[in-house]
Amino acid sequence: MNKLIETINLSYCYKAGTKEEVKALEDVNIAVWQGEIIAITGQNGSGKSTLARHFNGLLTPTTGSVLAGGMSTNLKENIREIRKIVGMVFQNPDNQLVSSIVEEDIAFGPENLGLPQTEIIERVEWALNTLKIEEHRREPLHNLSEGQKQQVAIAGVLAMKPDCIVLDEPTAHLDPRGRRDVLESIVRLNREEGITIVLLTHFMNEVIYCDRMIVMDQGSVKMQGTPHQIFCQSEHQKEQLHKMGLDYPVASQLAAGLKLEGFDIATDIIHTKELINSLCQLK
């Protein structure tokens, strides 16, 4: 796999050089590999959203550098090409939607790329089908639920055919059904379309579907690894996660509770299916 995004000694200060300077990131070194789905997690104020805004040049480092597709975000002449590679979906879809009708909104990005009309139509059709929202194509956006609006926002970025989509807390304001639908779409884009996904979330039940996760706290990277590596650690490391305000997946919590009650349950459970399999093996 190739590195799609890389941060090198990245630090960032809001209002740098003033009395109100606030350090949001400090010496962050991470890589996002092509084709993976990676979660960046942490409590509010941990720096994850600030970090994500560096991936396509919405912010540029105070010190250090960010490479996207091998191009530095520090060079203004690279930003247009970088944003073709890395698309961004924000927490509130209303901040991203620009048209009143679903298919018109999805067409907005490809139109700005100056593509021929026939290709724009093909891309809109593909995005609608991929997100499974074809029945809403001519619907006014104000008629949609928040979850459906978020699907349209993702489709709008998808229609631009980036290599990577960064999603900043895309399910934060959704009900459980909307959260499930959006998460399924995100995973499908990665598994079926090969699009690299960077998912910012504080929901641990979303993290378990990712290949890797990065845990941030106070502007620094504290842990990196697969979900199993992070959640199935020593008691000391588990305590560190709790101190950072992060919980465990529900299946992990249930397994730990059953273990305390004397059940012979596996200790490396993070998925519901793993818990069910372990319970089925009990005599």
Image (cartoon, helix red, strand yellow):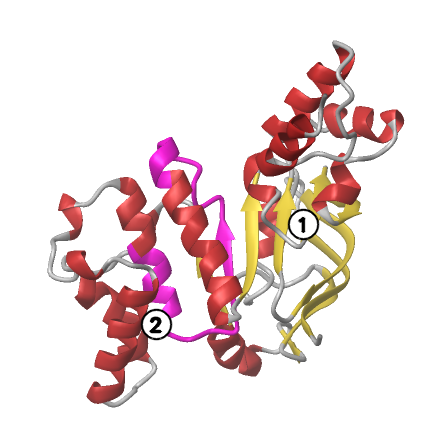
For the residue carrying disc 2, how many other residues have a C-alpha within 10 Å: few (<14), some (14-19), or many (20+)? many
Reading the image, the residue beneath label 1 is: 13
Instruction: Point out the stretch of residues depicted in magenta.
Output: 152-178
Residue 162 magenta: yes
How crowded is the residue under tag 1: few (<14 C-alpha within 10 Å), some, or many (20+)?
A: some
Where does the image place residue 230, in percent across and percent down from the top left? 77, 40
Describe the element under mark 2 as helix, strand or loop. Answer: loop
Report whether 12 appears left or right of 162: right
The residue where tag 2 is placed is: 159
Q: Quadrant of the N terminus?
A: bottom right
| Residue depicted at x 31% and y 43% | 147
Quarter assignment of residue 37: bottom right
Report if residue 174 is visible in the image.
Answer: no
From the viewer's perspective, is residue 207 above or below residue 256?
Answer: below
Q: Quadrant of residue 276?
A: top right
Q: Reading the chain from its start, which is encountered first: label 1 or label 2?
A: 1
Q: Which of 92/188 is in front?
A: 188
Does the segment drawn in magenta span residue 175? Answer: yes
Q: Position of residue 157 (x, y in %)?
A: 38, 66
Q: Residue at x 49, y 44 (%)?
A: 169
Report the quarter where the C terminus lies: top right
Amino acid beneath label 2: Ala
